[in-house]
Image (spheres, rainbow, N blue to C red):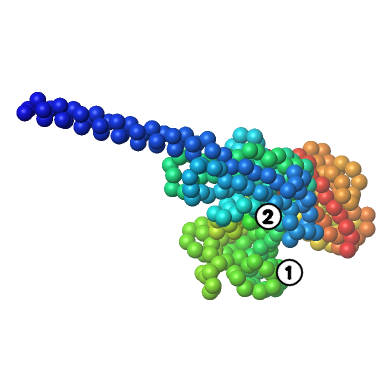
Amino acid sequence: MKKLFTKFLAFGGIGLLMLASCKKDDSNKVVALVSTAKGTLTASTTTPALSKAHLTDDAITFNIKSPNYGFNAGVSNTIQISTTADFATVKEASLNVKDVSKIFNVADFNNLLLALNLPGGISTTVQVRLKTQITGSPVAPTYSNVVTLTVTPFNLQASIYLAGAYEGWAVPSVNVDSLVSQTGNGIYIGIINFTAGNLEFKILPGNKNYDGNYGADGAGKITQGTGNPPNLAAPLAGLTFITVDINAKTIVYTPVTYYYSAIGDATPGVAWNTDTDLKYDNGNEAWVGNIPFTIGGFKVRRNHDWGISYGTVATPDGVSLTSASGGNIPITAAGTYSFSFKLNATVGKTAADNNNTSATYTLVKK
């Protein structure tokens, strides 16, 4: 009896092993099929036309076909765009479950390209593919064929505005400063001069009124909301470099340790002893001022110090400046001039940005 029972257990174990083996084989076949099945992607053009004058026009249509797994499967499809063939860095656009095509208008496709940090106005090659994932499956996603596009995105400058105690809370007002996104990607930067005791402010989508204003939502965060959120506040008085990311709803403050001024016997100060401070123009990335000059000359210097100063290396009105051995910028006729001084680098917070040896300027009599 004992022998018969032992044989029964042995046969039963073999049966279970055979059943498990069959299930494992089927599972492996499914995994293999899912892992190798790929979708297909085609584009209506490989050279989409992008122009500020046609923001709402269709730029490109992608036609998609999900992989054939041999069984019904819920999938999620995503269009990926990259500047490299290995798709090391991508930007994505998710598709609805039943989508068989995706149409991008000019504005949306241009923004997607700018999010890849592509330079405006320069022809660039990008790679596009379809990423497909079975919903809820641990199996890795699969990717379609790659479509190569030649694109020339354009910069679409956008602004937000800072109204606050530093300018008397007056809206609208010419004293309300702006932060600027040079590419319209939702990240705005600029320099604001906060005065002592006047650190609170609001962020405005427009410069006409307080509609839709952004306020504080905890440390480093902003919120728009439907009401009137709490005021934001700069951490310190003085020139402050501000970065606002409308997408992530964040704000970052960085003290600016450099500023620029005009000095010379042509400036309103006493000979070469008094600086006329310039204000930073966030939109044009330049230090500017309307200055009543007399006949004479002047230079630009940093932080009221001769350690770094800029003088002319040619003739006035739109020429180069140098911090090496430039001469005085001449004023041959008295009057109020619009003066603009621009370093040959994007305004930033690094030592290199703060110590440029060259710049340009414009000087226009009003």
Q: Pick the quarter of the image with the N terminus.
A: top left
Q: Residue at x 44, y 34 (%)?
A: 29
How far apart marks 2 and 1 lie (CA) works out to 41 Å
Q: Amino acid at mark 1?
A: Val
In this rendering, would 59 be left or right of 254? right
In this rendering, would 344 be left or right of 3? right
Residue 10 lies, with reference to residue 105, above or below; the image says above
- Front-most of residues 207 and 276: 207
Marker disc for residue 174: 1
Q: Amino acid at mark 2?
A: Ile
- Front-most of residues 133 and 8: 8
Please identify the quarter of the rendering in which residue 232 is found: bottom right
x and y percentages locating residue 32 in the rendered image: 47, 34
Estimate how packed mark 1 is, as few (under 14), some (14 to 19) or many (20 or more) residues with alpha carbons within 10 Å: few
Q: Residue furthest right?
A: 332
| Helix, strand or loop at mark 2 | strand
x and y percentages locating residue 342 in the rendered image: 77, 49
Q: Residue furthest top?
A: 3
| Helix, strand or loop at mark 1 | loop
- Which label's residue is closer to the chain start, 2 or 1? 2
Marker disc for residue 255: none
Please identify the quarter of the rendering in which residue 320 is found: top right
Estimate how packed mark 2 is, as few (under 14), some (14 to 19) or many (20 or more) residues with alpha carbons within 10 Å: some
Question: Which is closer to the viewer, label 2 or label 1?
Answer: 2
Q: Pick the quarter of the image with the C terminus.
A: bottom right
Q: Residue at x 51, y 59 (%)?
A: 221
Residue position marked by numbered label 2 in the rendering: 103
Residue 197 visible, this orientation: no
